[in-house]
Amino acid sequence: MIKKMKFIFAPLLIAAILGACSDSEEAAPKEEKAAETTEETAGERKTELELPEEKDVVAVINDEEVLGNVYNSVARQMESTLTAQGQDPTTPENAKMLKEQAMEVLIGNRLILQDAEEKGHTADDAAVKERLEELKGQFESEEAMNKALEQSGFTLDDMEEQLHDQVTYENYIAKELKPAEVTDKEVQEAYDGYAATAEEAPALEEMEPAIRQSLEQDKTQQAVSKRIEELKKEAKIDVKI
């Protein structure tokens, strides 16, 4: 059984996939690149998962369609995470869990964005442009970027739209949700738990900022999950795969 993986926002995963494509291109010798070209057809990344076509509708959420390319980016990232943990994502149990969690990410993100739009939250164009330039900067050339985009099933316009959603999502979370405050007692308990298993733990004062940040992220995730469950009660969700 795989543990439930936490993914707050899908487009972040898309950016991670593009970054990985860029890194692999920069690191791979020319001979290896040529071999990879013969092994993979254009526009495809190696995966053991059964994935929908990029333009297939995988879900309809409150009359809004979600396409296969978005689902596939999330599923592939989860596949990579499992593989890095030494687990086989293609076993029936893991494949079923991965599919369910990828869909949960898409549904949750879309419900949050729809609620954000209803409440008037949006993204500043300058912030989106800055994120897009940062993304472009991951690649050594425009050709390398376009190849990575093609492999992930997205165009540059798609990515700009996803980044717009990402900034909108972050604004919504910051303004609409109020996670519970992290207490000193919780920080101490987290530190004690770590120190009990570590051979040599740094002092609490040294670790406190990182521990507090991690606990704050957990509480934010809990608040997001709670809001998504509330939104689901009134939503019309039709999963197609």
Image (cartoon, grey):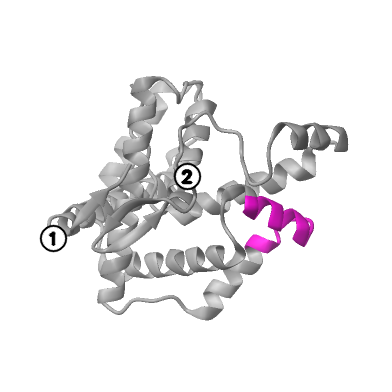
Q: In the depicted view, which residue is nearer to us: 44 or 123?
A: 44
Question: Left of 146 or right of it: where is 91?
Answer: left
Q: CA distance from mark 2 to mark 1?
A: 27 Å
What residue lies at 30% left-to-right and 52% top-to-bottom? 107
Outermost left residue? 233
Residue depicted at 13% across the width and 60% down the height: 234
- The kind of residue tagged 2 is Asn
Q: Which residue type does callout 1 highlight?
A: Glu
Label 2 SS:
helix
- Left or right relative to 213: residue 22: right
Circle 1 residue: 234
Nearer the observer: mark 2 or 1; the answer is 2
**Quarter of the figure that contains the N terminus:** top left
The range drawn in magenta is 135-150
- Residue under the image location 45 percent in, 23 percent down: 90
Q: Is residue 75 covered in magenta?
A: no
User: Seen in the image, is 205 located left or right of residue 239?
Assistant: right
Identify the secondary structure beneath mark 1. Answer: loop
Q: Position of residue 29 (x, y in %)?
A: 85, 36
Q: Is residue 205 visible?
A: no
Query: How many labels, in total?
Result: 2
Determine if the magenta segment contains residue 142.
yes
Mark 1 Cα within 10 Å, few/some/many (few <14, many 20+)? few
Image disc number at residue 72: 2
Residue 54 coordinates in the image, percent (x, y): 49, 50
